[in-house]
Image (cartoon, rainbow, N blue to C red):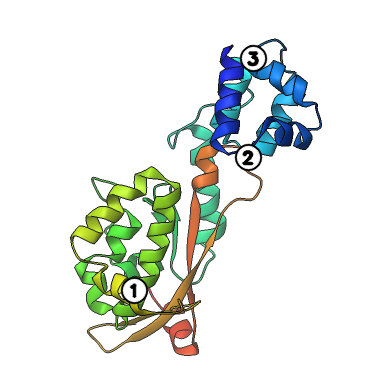
Amino acid sequence: MNSFGHILSAERKSRGVSQHRLATDVQTTQRHLSFLETGRSKPSREMIIRLSETMQLSHNQRGELFEAAGFTSPYSQRNLDSKSIRKTIELMEKYVLANWPYPGLILDPEMNILSFNQSAKSLFMLPNTSDAPMNVYDVLLSNGFIERVQNWEELSWAVYLRLRRQAQKHPQFRQKLESYEAAGLFDDAIKRLAHSSEVPPFIPIMMEFEDGTRLQFTSIEAGLSTVHDDILSGITIELVLPINEESDKLMRNQP
């Protein structure tokens, strides 16, 4: 079995898809797909694209298939320091964060904070600079933030469910989830899950500050839609959204 065939077979089997089903989906025969997996046939670039789209491979995985088949991969290997990635983040800062009237954050695929506007700095008590990447979960689960949250028992449920969903899909979040569970930060959330017959669809964040100021808000998550890069596909913008007029006025007037 050649390298391409080995990769193709492994990806297909990991998804629990039969040769017949995949062949049908990419509009070829099971015999031809079998020949591709055993190395008796060489794939065309068009076939690689159809296979990649059907199996929803990441851009790195697609590049691996192209190279295994003897083609030059059209997918460049980039990182956060790549010029094109930095330029895209700068566009998000200029046209999204700078114009959003409420707190906004740009997050990398591991939920580390890449950038934020002044309103987010005030709300989440973020430093101007940091020697190590700040993770949004470390901010939300810090003593300073939790102390200001008036409905932490309910909110911890939402944070826990979100982190658990990410841990199921991405290994990098599993250790973080386990460390928070070990520290007891999600004890209330786990108890509520165990004794509740229904998870509420929406939990606002209710905060009160030392001066008596109160805020109620949630957040919406956004990302670029026309992306052909694994790094950019994992970068998200977290935008705070007030849920009452008082919070709206207070957030708009933040320095």
Location of residue 116 with respect to 220 vertically, above or below: above
**Amino acid type, callout 3:** Thr
Q: Quadrant of residue 18?
A: top right
Location of residue 157 with respect to 232 vertically, above or below: below
Please tell me whether mark 3 or mark 2 is closer to you in this view: 3
Query: On the image, numbered disc 3 is attached to which residue?
Result: 38
Residue in front for this viewpoint, 18 or 104: 18
**Amino acid type, callout 1:** Ala
| Label 2: which secondary element | loop
Where residue 220 appears, as percent x and y from the top left, is 52, 67
Is 32 placed left or right of 221 in the picture?
A: right
Where residue 98 appears, as percent x and y from the top left, is 50, 61
| Label 3: which secondary element | helix
Residue in front for this viewpoint, 105 or 74: 74
Query: On the image, numbered disc 1 is attached to which residue?
Result: 194
Query: On the image, numbered disc 2 is attached to which residue?
Result: 56
Q: Give how far apart the Cα atoms at labels 2 and 1 are.
A: 35 Å
First in sequence, mark 1 or 3: give its number.
Answer: 3
| Label 1: which secondary element | helix
Is residue 71 among the parts visible in the rendering? no
User: Which residue: 65% across, 11% down?
Assistant: 39
User: Which residue: 46% across, 85% down?
Assistant: 249
